[in-house]
Amino acid sequence: MKNAQCKKCLNKFHEKDIYTIQQFQYREEPPYRWSLEFFKKSNIDEWDSFCEKCLMEYSKNSKEIWDESKNSKD
Ligand SMILES: [Zn+2]
């Protein structure tokens, strides 16, 4: 039964396929703390469910913004 829903695209999917931003703890960059703050601004917390596709999108976007912010500081 597909009883999980992605907060972003609203697609339904299986609970075992839930992705959350907690996944970003394992990224080297940006630091997880930064990621948490970043997503907080979009009202996303560690317990929100996303499908894999949307989480990958967030991953890419946040990394890009992190890189930009790093460059602007130098
Ligand atoms: Zn989604």
Image (tube, rainbow, N blue to C red):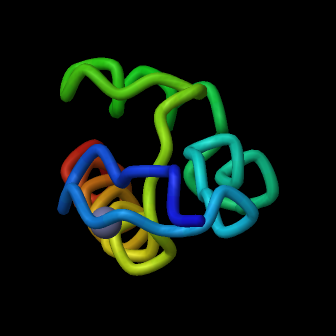
Estimate the x, y position of residue 43 in percent, counting from the top left.
Answer: 25, 20
Q: Residue furthest right?
A: 26
Q: Quadrant of ligand 1?
A: bottom left
Q: Toward which corner of the image does residue 12 lie, by quadrant? A: bottom left
Decide: is 16 above or below 35: below
Estimate the x, y position of residue 19 in percent, counting from the top left.
Answer: 60, 57
In front here: 5 or 62?
5
The residue that appears at 81% across and 57% down in the rendered structure is 26
In-image side of 7 versus 17 (left or right): left
The residue that appears at 52% across and 64% down in the rendered structure is 2
In front here: 47 or 35?
47
Q: Toward which corner of the image does residue 47 lie, by quadrant? A: top right
In-image side of 10 versus 18 (left or right): left
The residue that appears at 49% across and 44% down in the rendered structure is 49
In front here: 4 or 50?
4
Estimate the x, y position of residue 61 in percent, counting from the top left.
Answer: 27, 65
